[in-house]
Amino acid sequence: MLELDDLCTIAWEEETGSIIYIDQTLLPGRCEQMRCTTVEDLARAIRRLEIRGAPALGIAGAMGVALAAARSTERSLDRFLADVGRAADLLRGTRPTAVNLAWGIDRVIRKIAVAASVDEAKTVAAAEAKAVADEDELVCRRLGAFGEGLLPDDCTVLTHCNAGALACRCWGTALGVIRSAVAAGKNVRVIACETRPLNQGSRLTCWELLRDGIDVTLIPDSSAAYLMRKGRVDLVIVGADRITRDAVFNKVGTYMHAVTARHHGIPFYVAAPLSTFDLSRVESEIVVEERDRSELACSGDRQLAPDGVNVLNYAFDATPLDLVDAIVTEIGVLRPPYAESFRLAGRREGVRP
């Protein structure tokens, strides 16, 4: 079985011009590498959540453009760019709520748009996609270093979904903060919500932390509030799929944890790179992805709900920023008032205005 230390979640294979990734739908039972050789394969892998997590989707988007460029047979630069653009549009439509996917796509598209030839564009696309992946590791480690200061020397942390190495190239965002705190010698225990209906918490977060030797306890999503009331949780930290001027979009159930944490006086933190910020928009402008009925109505081959019953299966929810005590980024910890924090961060790093 592969170890995370032996393989990044997603990588560009220069020799074949293809994408290698861990199929996350097979975990925790099997950890296997898969290969994407076409953009259609990649789009299918993203829709099926074989590749998931905001930063990992950013990398996948960038590599998807490189893949389209490598596979294009067009020799006219204009037709080549149009060909790659169609592939980019296909990828962009796979996950509408997670902003990193479009960010990664657009970053490589901008680079190849100024290329002088098709051959140069192909070389530039592969180099930029690799740069996106390499930068992600550095960003996550910097983010973790800033965030570990928020964790007491001895604490129990609740997290929701998976914002770890599997959601990035490696290290992670919310779990990266936890990893950094443990590396600094802190005694950190983690409570991982199962994260229904696809169980990213039980399947992925528990798998990662167990392999790291970090104390982790799995709970049903519905018991988090009770544990907070019992004083069993010191803080909550989650990742993000998009941060607008007024809200944090993350795996559905996050808002519930934020409300409960505020009621019990427990800090609620978000860990996300600046590539997840979309400060040109507000919550009401964002499309929240709705996923297939079968994810709720079935468990494998077993039917969980009667035929004909209506199902509402949101993949994400939005947490108002007034419930967020701090946002950990690679340039530091942002705190309320967020309008001012975002303005300063944008001036420093060129975050989307």
Image (tube, rainbow, N blue to C red):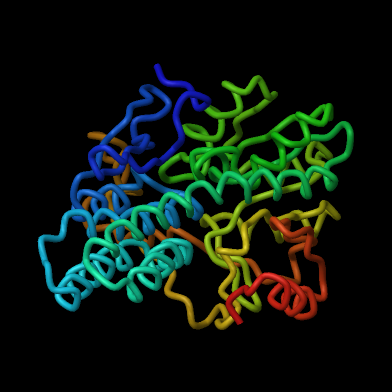
Image quarter where the N terminus lies is top left
Residue 138 relative to residue 131: left or right: right
Residue 106 drawn above or below residue 245: above
Give the residue displayed 43% in from the left and 49% down from the top.
Answer: 130
Residue 200 relative to residue 183: left or right: left
Spot occupied by residue 181 in the image (x, y as percentages of width and height): 78, 35
Spot occupied by residue 79 in the image (x, y as percentages of width and height): 14, 75
Which residue of the protein is positioned furthest toward the right in this rendering? 153
Give the residue displayed 19% in from the left and 74% down from the top.
Answer: 77
The quadrant where residue 193 appears: top right
Give the residue displayed 48% in from the left and 52% down from the top.
Answer: 131
Give the residue displayed 49% in from the left and 55% down from the top.
Answer: 54
Spot occupied by residue 160 in the image (x, y as percentages of width and height): 60, 46
Spot occupied by residue 12 in the image (x, y as percentages of width and height): 35, 43
Which residue of the protein is positioned furthest toward the top in this rendering? 1
118 or 220: nearer the viewer: 118
Q: How many numbered discs, if any?
A: 0
The quadrant where residue 162 appears: top right
206 or 300: nearer the viewer: 206
186 or 288: nearer the viewer: 186
343 or 262: nearer the viewer: 343
Residue 303 relative to residue 128: left or right: left
Residue 154 drawn above or below residue 76: above
Image quarter where the C terminus lies is bottom right
Residue 66 drawn above or below residue 183: below
